[in-house]
Image (cartoon, rainbow, N blue to C red):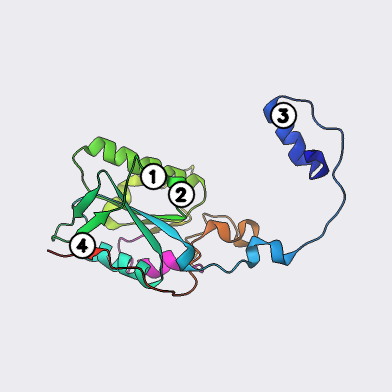
Amino acid sequence: MWANVDQEMACILAENVGVERPKKSHVQVEKSYPSLSQMNTPFYACTQRVAVLIGNGFNDKEVENTLNVFQQYGVFIEVVSENLGTITGVNGTKIEVDKTFITTYPILYDSQYVVGGNAKNEANFHQNILTFVNEAYKHYKPIGIASIGQSYIHRSDKNNLAGIVFATNNPNFESEFISPQSPNNAFGIEHKNRGDACHPRFLSKKSPQPNRLRAL
């Protein structure tokens, strides 16, 4: 059956499930339908879900500014932390937690804003963030790194950190993270080859989300 769609794909499937490679060949049709292409899909901030990975002791002003920009663009924000309740910044700003690391999964988000911080179980907290970051990176999803979150990802011979936007010494962090034109959000893969699935698709402002921040 799959050989009628694409012979190469059918052969790969056969090898992976341990059956004989198909002898049939797919129909030779080379038609393009722009209406079915993801390249032509209009993407908006109001369709995007961003996981905010955060603990106590975050930089109040930095995080508040970033979340406010997300809200202005209608981004769906879910705050993920060790426990439900609230987390507190160094200057007393409180943020409500939506999910814990055991009640949600990294694949449910289009992007991640990695803040970090501290928690009661430090080792477990940091390991959970690393799991989220690794999953997002290998699935070509954009990642924003707050100033205190840089320890969660490092440049090496096995990655080029394309698609990662750092807040440290970057006054344009928010705009780069939400802009589809940013050179940082394609993970080193050309836009024309991977389409819009590899970068944040925040193209226009929609209805703002409710303010999530509470100051003491």
Which residue is found at the position 42% from the left and 44% from the top? 105
Residue at mark 2: 108
Three-letter residue code for mark 2: Leu
Distance, label 4 to label 3, CA atoms, is: 52 Å
Q: Marks 3 and 1, how far apart in space?
A: 33 Å
Q: In the image, what residue type sits under mark 1?
A: Thr
Residue at label 3? 15
Q: Which residue is mark 4?
A: 60
Labels 2 and 3: the sequence-earlier one = 3
Which residue has dot 1 on it? 104
Answer whether residue 23 is magenta in the image.
no
Q: Are marks 2 and 1 in contact (CB under 8 Å)?
A: yes
Contact between marks 3 and 1 (CB within 8 A): the answer is no
First along the sequence among labels 4 and 3: 3
**CA separation, marks 2 and 3?**
30 Å
Magenta span: 166-181
In the rendered view, would you say 15 is above or below 65? Answer: above
Residue 172 visible? The answer is no
Q: Residues within 10 Å of mark 2 (few under 14, many from 20)?
A: few
- Comes first in the chain, label 3 or label 1: 3
Viewer-nearest of labels 2 and 3?
A: 2
Distance between mark 2 and mark 4 Cα atoms: 26 Å
Q: From the viewer's perspective, tell me whether residue 14 is left or right of residue 45.
A: right
